[in-house]
Image: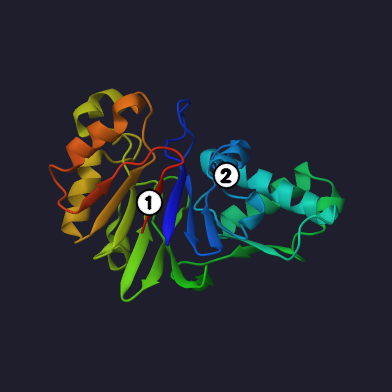
Amino acid sequence: MNITMLGTGNAMVTECYNTCFVLQDGEKHLLVDGGGGNTLLRQLKQAGFAWQDMREIFVTHKHVDHLMGIVWMIRMICQHMKQGQYEGEAWIYGHDEVIGLLKEMAEQLYPKKLTDFIGKRLHLVVVNDGEERTLMGHKVTFFDIRSTKAKQYGFCMDMGNGEKLTCCGDEPYNECEEKYAENSKWLLHEAFCLYDQADVFHPYEKHHSTAKDASELAEQLGVKNLILYHTEDKNIARRKQLYTEEGRKYFHGSLYVPEDLEKIEL
């Protein structure tokens, strides 16, 4: 199994794409979030993926930097179904607010000849807190991160052999996530900025973490591998070095600060 980071930035970046990624296990893929627009399609292509292979999609929440790329995926899927150029079905998962908004946007933006495929071959599936589904052939448990902003879900994937991958979304860890995040082989957690630059980027006022915070958390939770994402882009040229240096002061497992399009073997 591997992960490819299509984007690694927060909502307002211009030097990289918004945070979204693809998990891959053999020929199976799970796209998580879509970034803020149709640049998602370019990122998929540049990463070596065919967008048509993204048959399972999960959307964490309804902020535009996570949702709008999925609106484009809906158009691409339905349009190619109409043209007879898309075989089979696709599934998009999210909590009730995400799925409701995607349905509404599709109905408002796209003609009926396209939206007729929604519910027939393109399935928009509501998942609930604690619900288990099988995605990519793996058991996945969705959980409410108890966001103070927009309702948001993370997920925990059973990797087999008693190992798990946990995605905490793009807000700081909440104690309600402990049973999912604790002892994860892989933890995906946001790091809005460096702790040393908190006075510049004000992460706490925006309900975000620093690289130091996320690294301390991973150490406390007994995590083996930590991936930091959803960062600012003012340090983009030296981001990997700076965030790694800060994080390694507090986390003694393997720390990853990926660039856009970087692939990591899990």
User: Residue 84 in the image: x percent, y percent?
Assistant: 84, 57
- The reply, left or right, for residue 214 in relation to residue 57 is left
Q: Secondary structure at mark 1?
A: strand
- Against 40, residue 78 (above or below) is below
Estimate how packed mark 2 is, as few (under 14), some (14 to 19) or many (20 or more) residues with alpha carbons within 10 Å: many
- Residue 227 spot, x, y in % from top left: 32, 49
Q: Which mark is residue 264?
A: 1
- Quadrant of the image for the N terminus? bottom left
Under circle 2, the secondary element is helix
Name the kind of residue labelled 2 in the image: Leu
Q: Does the image show residue 172?
A: no
First in residue order: circle 1 vs circle 2 = 2
* Residue 139 position (above or below residue 92): below
Amino acid marked by disc 1: Ile
What residue is rendered at 43% in x and 45% in y?
A: 149
Residue 20: x and y in percent read: 48, 46
For residue 220, side relative to residue 8 (left or right): left
Q: Residue at x 85, y 52 (%)?
A: 83
Q: Which mark is residue 44?
A: 2
**Quadrant of the drawing holding the C terminus:** bottom left
Q: Residue at x 37, y 30 (%)?
A: 232
Q: Determine which quarter of the picture holds residue 197.
A: top left
Side of 187 where 74 appears, left or right: right
Q: Locate residue 218: give its quadrant.
A: bottom left
The location of residue 222, given as percent across then percent down, is 19, 61
Vertical position of residue 196 compared to residue 115: above or below? above
Disc 1 and disc 2: Cα gap in Å?
A: 15 Å
- Based on the displayed image, in which of its 4 quarters is residue 41 positioned? top right
Q: Residue at x 87, y 52 (%)?
A: 113
Q: Residues within 10 Å of mark 1 (few under 14, many from 20)?
A: some
Farthest residue, direction bottom: 161
